[in-house]
Amino acid sequence: MDPTPRNISTFMFPTAVCTRNPPPEPDFAGLDWSESALNPKNRIDSLEAPCNSEWTIHGADLAGTRWFAVPRFAIGRPPLRIDVHIPDLFDVPGYLRDTLSPNSPMFGELEDAGRSNIAIHILRALQYWSDNNKSLEKKYFELPFGSRIMFNTMNCDVRQIKILIVPIYDIERQWLSIRTLQEMWKLPEDAWPSVLDFESLHFHRQLHDTITVVSIPQYGDQQFIFKSLMNDVKYFYHELKVLMTMRPHPNIISKPIHVVTKRCGFGGRRGVCGMILEYYPKGTLRRWLKEHRQIPGPDNPAAEISWAKQIVSALMHIQEHGPGFYTNLKLDNIVMADSQDTSIPKVVIIDFEQRLGSPAWTPPEIHCVSFLNDLIHHDPKSPISRKYRDLFERYGVAVPDMERAARYTNPEAGYCYPWPTLAAREREAAQVFMLGKLLWCIFENSSLLNSYIGINSFRDNHSETLFPDLFKTPGALRKCILQCTIGSWESRERTPPLVAKGREIVLRASRNQRGEDSLEDVQVAIRKWWRQQISDAENFFERRFSGQSDGNWARRPTLRDVLEVLENLET
């Protein structure tokens, strides 16, 4: 089955039980002549990048509907984060889907997306549009932060594509002033980094939807990260507070160098719009594992043990001298950095927004409760929503108010429900679970768990190894990894039925066989699996909140136990 952002989003979430079938796939067979890519009127005249283009594309989101396209006149200017949005794959005519492959960002790294057919077509359309919009530069810099350039339609003829500028005001409305944050946090004055005016930032390139590479005149050619959020700004303020108050550690991202403020387009007030962080050009641990897996030669156990120890040390530091827990441990939230003591690069944990991680990485005590919470908020008037709202109320468990949580209110433990409801030892056990998955990736040299279909499951070079298969991991560590991940789907014979194989979604049971699984087989398998997951979640919820222990977290080792195992590997 071909993966698309829409069917994967259906598979990824417990709301799959509410959907009889995922949306139908585009049908490229049986098109009439008017819809055929062979019809001359439907042919794209060129898929060569325009010469001397006034636009450049730095990447796209994995869904392929949001593109980080920047006009040349914006390079070296303040990063207004004005992205290009195009129609969804299913809203594009069939003859264009086949030629442009709008979902191509799913199959490569962010920067690779700019070389795809769809990216070139977007560039050509933008070039034609801007050539006929002489006042564009003036309009562009008058827009609020986070505004959009919208493609209302897609067409084989770029001259027929209707492109609009859409001002977005809500992001700036969510910004809080320095004074408001100071009154909320009541931190000593020396805890605050110096304030930098947004206008002093010089844009270089976009690495991620929240990560922009910039330079600042007072630092010469040195490059930094400007981190800002385009939605859910509350997570940014929580991360800012965490980084400002946590003690330094060599394997945790440093305190912000500057807080960035910008004058809002309405009212003239100044809001905190981002922060300046150190830039790590070596990239993430996931990229490192992916790229070095392709280089022939022996593994480097000394490096792997060193990285593992650094990560455990950082998690212990977070527990003792930081927010107390880290909710989203995964390969993409660890970057590589130069080490002063050895030629082996060190690892650094980043991203303290404290969002909920993927179910592939999080333990059952987290995702079981979050699954039920998702069903409550999916369709608040539905019978299934009322069923689980009643379940929460029966055990006196508060249902998070999603509307109230939209704005930042300075919650002590952040917005990552249900982490704040766990006791300290339970939080540590939940982190150990994620650590076990991470150790498996490091020592099996795998950049992907491949145990759960997600929108990012197809961008890596796949190995046949699936968690918890252990081939390269040292013997003494194998038992530790399995103990860390007690309660996992795999240990309870609840493994998701779908896996990624090349550029296809296949049934796990038939991944080593030739031939394609039918769409019906895939749909039946995933619905059956989600029904079992929700049943398990109900049982877990009732045991936990009626005072019974599920027994999983208590049987996992502590962080210090894992550190001792790693230290013994060196002897």
Image (cartoon, rainbow, N blue to C red):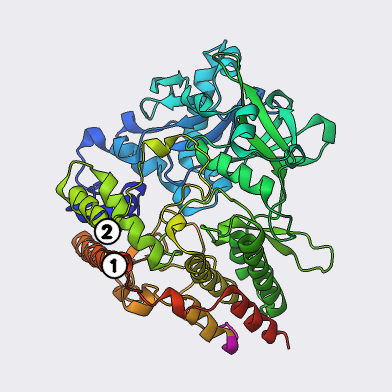
Mark 2 crowdedness (10 Å alpha carbons): few <14, some 14-19, many ≥20: few
Q: Which residues are magenta?
A: 471-476
Which residue is found at the position 45% from the left and 80% from the top?
A: 555
Q: Are marks 2 and 1 in contact (CB under 8 Å)?
A: yes
Q: What residue is at 62 percent from the left and 42 percent from the top?
A: 240
**Helix, strand or loop status at disc 1:** loop
> Does 404 lie within the magenta span?
no
Q: Which residue is mark 1?
A: 546
Magenta-highlighted stretch: main secondary structure?
Answer: loop
| Residue 395, label in figure | 2
Does residue 305 sit above or below 166 in this rendering? below
Q: CA distance from mark 2 to mark 1?
A: 7 Å
Q: Position of residue 440 (x, y in %)?
A: 54, 74
Residue type, mark 1 in image: Ser
In the rendered image, residue 203, in percent from the top left (x then y), is placed at 68, 32
473 in the magenta segment = yes
Mark 2 falls on what kind of element? loop
Left or right: residue 108 compared with residue 551: right
320 to the left or right of 500 = right
Relative depth, front residue between 322 and 503: 322
Residue 255, relative to residue 436: is it above or below?
Answer: above
Which one is in front, 131 or 328? 328
Of callouts 2 and 1, the N-terminal one: 2
Total number of numbered discs in the rendering: 2
The extreme left residue here reads: 383
Name the quadrant of the C terminus: bottom right
Residue 454 lies, with reference to residue 223, above or below; the image says below
Q: Position of residue 247 (x, y in %)?
A: 72, 54
